[in-house]
Structures are given as C-alpha cells and as structure tokens.
Image (tube, coloured by chain):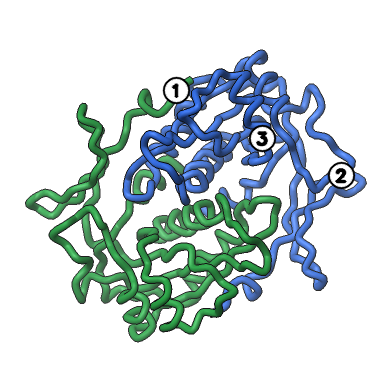
Chain colours: A blue, B green
Amino acid sequence: MIRELILKNRSYRRFYQETTIDLETLKELVDLARCSASAANRQPLKYILSCGPEKNALVFQHLAFAASLKDWSGPAEGERPSAYIIVLGDTEISKSFGVDPGIAAQSILLGAVDRGLGGCMLGAIQRDGLRKALDIPERYEILLVIALGKPGETVVLETVSPDGNTTYWRDKDSVHHVPKRSLDDIIIG
Amino acid sequence: MIRELILKNRSYRRFYQETTIDLETLKELVDLARCSASAANRQPLKYILSCGPEKNALVFQHLAFAASLKDWSGPAEGERPSAYIIVLGDTEISKSFGVDPGIAAQSILLGAVDRGLGGCMLGAIQRDGLRKALDIPERYEILLVIALGKPGETVVLETVSPDGNTTYWRDKDSVHHVPKRSLDDIIIG
C-alpha cells in the first residue's frame, strides 16, 4: 500500500486554493517528520508553519515554481497552495543537514497524500527576502519550503525517451508529464 | 496509516540474518525511490544491490554501525543485514544531490517496513574501500548504504530529557532507546 501512496505523491503545483488546511493538520505532518530518521539522531531541523492568507502570501512571493516550464510563472491566484511548511536547519545543532531534509519532506508529503492533500518541495527560494518577511533568525538556514494544498492538476509519470531528456512538460490539456528513468537505467550492479 | 508505517520504520541495526531478501524485492524497493520526487526531476541517483552472502560480506566490512554506542562495534555474525542497497550519485548527471538521497532512502525503508522488513541508513562508510571492493567507477559518488533485513531488535522512541541530550542508548535488555525532540521544540513559528 505504500506503493500506491508513493505513486499518488506527485509534485503538485496547482491547487484548489479555497480548500484550507488547519494548523493542527500541519502539526500532524511535522510530527511524521519528527518521528522519522535523523543522521546520528541529532534532529537539527526546525519548522515554520503557514496556513493563513496573509502569511501564505508572504511565503508565496519568495518562491519559484517549476523552473522548467518556461511559459508558466507559477500558480495563479485561486490555484495557489493553502499552506506551507518551511524546513529550517538549526546551525546551533549542526552545520550540515545531510539527508535529513529529504527524509522529513518525504514523510510530510506522504502524510499529506494520505489525507487527500498533496504538495511540492521547493528549493528555489528567495532566501534573504523570505528571512526578512518572516523575521527568521540568522541561526536557521532555510533549507526547503513544502507547499501544500488539495491538488488541482493531473500529473502522470512516463518513461524517459531514448534521448534521455528528463525535463517535465505540460500538454495542451494542462496535464503535467514527468519522464522517469527506467529501473534498468538506475540499477547499475 | 502512513503514521503507523513511519512509527514502525525505526533504524534497525540487528536482524534475523537467516531471513534472506531476494533481488526482486530489492528492485521493487528501488522502484519506490524511482517513482519519488527528484530535484528538477534530474534523477541523478543510481543503485547497487546486494543480497548474497559474499557480496553482503564485502559491503558489511566497509560500514560503521551506531557510532554513539561506544561498547558495540556492530551486528555480530547471525544478526547482520540480509541485503544492502547502495545509493550512488551520478556526477555525469549532477554535481550535487541535495534532498534526493533522503527522499529515496525514506521511500525504500517505508517500502521495506510495509513488507515486514526494516533497515537503517548508513552514512559512515569507508568509501575508498567499498569502491575498490565492488569496483564502483569514479563517476559515482557513494552517498549512502541502506542495510536491510528482518529486524531482530526492539527500538523505542522517547522524549528528549531536559538536558537536551539526543544520544540513543541501549538498556540492559538490549532495547534501543531513541530520544526525540518534542513538537514544541521543533516548530518555531
């Protein structure tokens, strides 16, 4: 059943913005990250939650969505994320964060999908601007923003074509296509 | 239900070594990673699988288990992992691998737990030795080794004590205790 959840957990970038997500749900999602593995159990990750319209707008304006879609500058008003979880690295605990952000983000997104939600990990962040807007102390490195909402788009996996191009694309019906390398391509021994 | 799986997915370091894992299972687990998110969909991760006694022994001797348990040098013969998935970064695709290894490893381990197995991500690897032993080309950066097997130990989560010490420990009954920071400690805004 984890396979179904992983297949359903696509990177969604357009949402039914009117479907709100409450703070309690965000806390439950962070709790999944909290109970996941951390290198040497140091647990250097900290989190900022956002699910209200003003804070969401502040976060949104410091994000870039889907750099590979050249003719799309991100979700329009009405299809934007309903919530965000900002993943920070506490430099007073650790100077590097290794695999922890990936583990945490995957747990959070699988938890979201399990609740009928979905989202996307965003690494293209105007970090200085976001830090200023949310008054994030210098002690915390901004690692990732996880955008969350009720998905409002269809995303399909397909096999990479022989030219090896992995760039995702959208068709005329606005379906988002994601080429994945085959199992034979990625298992080398 | 993902919560149950995440809670069950502890870092296991002792196994019923006689319970083997076949290659097909390892491929199914890698397929979960393959279908998970990858930054900009570049998919730079490659994998080496090991589930036979000779190859397992080669991998095992280049790993360090549980650095924080000073009086334990790793699982004894009979309680060692039954299989390994070595996670590599293909430097011809990307020079840095960001959150991808954490995402992939979490998908693989949740898939293992879903099958009644379990494991541990290991970053303390004698990389030069492992590269030589398995003849891994320089092109591939050795990122992680995921040890897998049928768990042969009990691991419990508990709350970090007021002194903030997150070091895991084993009690006299050989139960492995993992102190986790509280939700209030990790949500800062």
Real-space Cα distance between discs 3 and 2? Answer: 17 Å
Q: Which residue is identified by label 2?
A: A70
CB contact under 8 Å: marks 1 and 3:
no
Real-space Cα distance between discs 2 and 1? Answer: 35 Å
Q: Chain of mark 3?
A: A
Q: Which residue is identified by label 3?
A: A125
> Disc 3 or 2, which lies upstream in sequence?
2
Discs 2, 1: same chain:
no
Q: Along the line of sight, which residue is nearer the eye, A91 or A42?
A: A91
Q: Quadrant of residue A182?
A: bottom right
Q: Is residue A189 left or right of residue B63?
A: right
The three-letter code of the residue at mark 2 reads Lys
The three-letter code of the residue at mark 1 reads Ile
**Number of the label disc, if any, that sits on residue B188:** 1
Q: Along the line of sight, which residue is nearer the eye, B36 or B117?
A: B36
Total numbered labels placed on residues in the image: 3
Real-space Cα distance between discs 1 and 3? Answer: 19 Å
Q: Is residue B68 above or below residue A72?
A: below
The three-letter code of the residue at mark 3 reads Ile
